[in-house]
Amino acid sequence: MDQQHAQELRKLKSQGLVKLRLDGPDNREVITHKNVPNKISHDFNILKYSMTEFLNRDPERPTLVDLYRGSKNCIIETFVDDESYQEQLKAEDEKMDAYLTKHYKADEE
């Protein structure tokens, strides 16, 4: 990791954010709430959802991301206007405290 990338990650961490790389036809990076990786594991492994949704908080490209379980080819980003984005950002922040840990498998497995 180069110095610039490390500095970017430290800055994001201080804001309660993380950078994720989504594998797919065109690998992309998104900036999310620090608990989004835990939400993804909860939605896929506990709730058995086939899709989860979260905000890409990249200030240059804020989007709503639909991530489909088991599919590298189906990651949808929906562009949102600033007003909708701010409402969704507030709603997501309120929910994120529920996702403090990762879940590697369902409780009954």
Image (cartoon, rainbow, N blue to C red):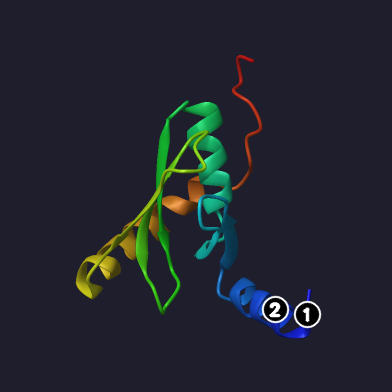
Q: Nearer the viewer, residue 29 or 42?
A: 29
Which label is found at residue 55? none
For label 2, the residue is: 5
Q: Residues within 10 Å of mark 1 (few under 14, many from 20)?
A: few
Task: Name the side, left or right, on which 84 lies relative to 37.
Answer: left
Looking at the picture, how far across and down is residue 33, in whole percent? 51, 61
Q: Secondary structure at mark 1?
A: loop
Q: Amino acid at mark 1?
A: Asp
The residue shown at (38%, 56%) is: 92
Looking at the picture, how far across and down is residue 78, in whole percent? 30, 58
Residue 9 falls in image quadrant: bottom right
Q: Nearer the viewer, residue 55 or 66?
A: 66
Q: Amino acid at mark 2?
A: His
**Discs 2, 1 touching: Cβ within 8 Å:** yes
Q: Secondary structure at mark 2?
A: helix
- In the picture, the quarter occupied by the N terminus is bottom right
Task: Name the side, left or right, on which 98 lies relative to 92.
Answer: right
For label 1, the residue is: 2
